[in-house]
Image: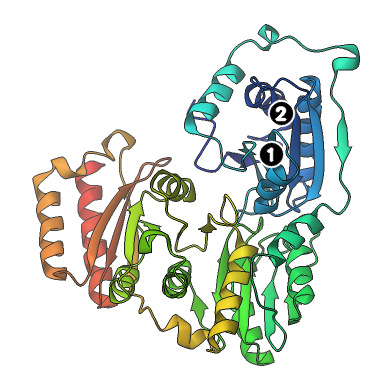
Amino acid sequence: MGRLFGTDGVRGIANKELDSELAFNLGRIGAYVLTEETHHKPRIAVGKDTRVSGDMLEAALIAGICSMGAEAVVLGVQPTPAVAYLTRHLGLDAGIVISASHNPFEYNGIKFFDNKGYKLSDELEDRIESLLASPHDKIANPVGAEIGKKVEIDNAVHGYIDFLKKTIDVNLRGMKIAVDCANGAAYIAAPSVLADLGAEIVVIHNKPDGKNINVDSGSTHPSRLQKLVVDTGAHVGLAFDGDADRLIAVDNKGRLVSGDHMLAIFAKHLKAKGKLSKDTIVGTVMSNMGLDIALKKEKCGLVKTAVGDRYVLEEMIKNGYNIGGEQSGHIIFLDHNTTGDGLLTALQLLAVVKESGKKLSDLASIMTELPQVLVNAKVKNENKNKYMEDREIAAMIANLEEKLDGCGRVLIRPSGTEPLVRVMLEGENETEIKEDASRLAKLIESKMS
C-alpha cells in the first residue's frame, strides 16, 4: 500500500477509498497525535465544503475526535483557509477540513492543520499513518466524563469575513465584480465580503446541491465567468475552486489572469510600498518563464520550489518570504494567513486595482505568458526516474535546451503517483514546442516502457 497522505491530505472516492471507518480512525488517531503534548482537553475545529459526502465524513470524524476525549468544534461549511484562520483565532489545538478541493463531487478528502493554522509536516502525517496501521487497542479510550463532545459554532464564517475585510485599506464602491463560487465553500463568504465592502456583484454557481461542486464552474472551468464579465461590463471576474483556497481572475476584457500574472502584479505593488520581503516571491518549477522575465524587469527575485503549495509555504517560512504561489491560483500571503486563500487573494487584487486606478487588463500586461505544452509519457513505474540514464534521451533534452537558447526551457517531471513522465516545454513558438514535446515523450516511452 502506498502512502495514505498525499501532498494535500488524504483523498479518495467517498465511501470507497475514503469511508466512514477511515474518517473515524483519522479523527481518533489525529486527535491523539495532534494533542499528545496538550495538558488540557483539546479542542479541534472541523469544517467542510458542500459535497454530499461531507455530512457522513463529518459525523465519523467528530465521533473519532470525541472518542479520544477531545472537543470537536464544528464550523459547518467553510473555505479551507477559513478553517486555518479560525483554528488560530479561536485558540484551538488543531483543525480539520473535509474537502477534495477542485476534484469532482464523488471525491472527498481530509486535511489537518496544527494549532498555528499550518498544514501538518511529513513527520506528523507519518506518525498518524503509522498508528493507523497498528492495533488501535494500544491507545486507551477515555470513559465517563472524559469522553469528548461537539460544540457547534453558528455563523462561524462571519468571523472569517470580518478578518478578510481588515486585510485591505480601501472599499470597493464603484466596482462591478462577477463572481463564480463553483457551488462550493465560498458560496456564502465571497458574495458577503464583497457586498460588505461596497462592490456591485453578479454571482453565478452559488447554489450548491451536494453534487454540483466544480461542475463546469469555478477556477478550473472559467469560460462562463469570462463571458459574464464581458456581457455585464464587470471590472473584474473572480473564480474560486471548491474549497476556495485558490483564485483565477478574469480581466475587464474577459481574459484569464493566472496565478503567475497575479504574483507579478503583487510583487510590483508590494515592492513599491516597501512591503515585499527581500524583494522576492516564491513560485514553483512550473511557474511560467514569463514570470521570471517580468520580475527581472521589476528587479524582483523569484525562488522556485517543487510543485505544491506546501513546498512554497515551507520555503517562505524557512527563508522569511511573505508571498508565494502557483500558476493554479494558490497564493499565500503569509502576512495575513497560513495557507492558500482565494478570497484573501481576490481582495488583495481588487485593492491593487482600486489603489492604482488602472484596469486589470493593464495591470496584467506586466507579464507576457510564454506558451507551455505538457505531454505525458507512459512508462514502467520502476523506470520513471531513470530517463537521464539513457544517452539518446539525454542528448535530445540537451539539443532542445540549446535550440530554445534562453527563450524557453525543458522540464521533465516523473509523476509521484502514476507510471508517467511529464514532459513540459516552454517557448515562444507554440507549434514548434508541441512537436518537440511529443517527439521527446515518444522517445521516453519507447526507451522506458
Q: In the image, 410: left or right of 310?
A: left
Closer to the camera, 265 or 372? 265
Q: In the image, 279: left or right of 407?
A: right
Residue underneath mark 2: 27
Which callout, 1 or 2, points at the residue further toward the start of the chain? 2
The label shown at residue 96 is: 1
Q: How many marks?
A: 2
Tag 2's secondary structure?
Answer: helix
Q: Quadrant of the C terminus?
A: top left
Q: In the image, 289: left or right of 108?
A: left
| Distance CA(mark 1)–CA(mark 2) | 9 Å
Q: Position of residue 267 (x, y in %)?
A: 42, 69
Q: Where is residue 438 in the image (x, y as percent from the top left)?
A: 26, 62
- At a point 23% along the width and 69% down the height, the residue shown is 408
Q: Can the viewer see residue 429?
A: yes
Asked if residue 316 is positioned above or below residue 250 in the image, the reply reads above
Closer to the camera, 387 or 379? 387
Closer to the camera, 139 or 93? 93
Q: Position of residue 85 (x, y in %)?
A: 68, 49
- At a point 13% along the width and 69% down the height, the residue shown is 405
The label shown at residue 310 is: none
- At a point 71% along the width and 36% down the height, the residue shown is 15
Kind of residue sitting beneath label 1: Ile
Q: Where is residue 309 in the image (x, y as percent from the top left)?
A: 48, 51
Asked if residue 250 is positioned above or below residue 174 in the image, the reply reads above
Kind of residue sitting beneath label 2: Gly
Q: Can the viewer see residue 212?
A: no
Q: In the image, 239: left or right of 153?
A: left
* Mark 2 neighbour density, 10 Å: few (under 14) some (14–19) many (20 or more): many
Callout 1 touching callout 2 (CB < 8 Å) = yes
For residue 162, which quarter of the picture?
A: bottom right
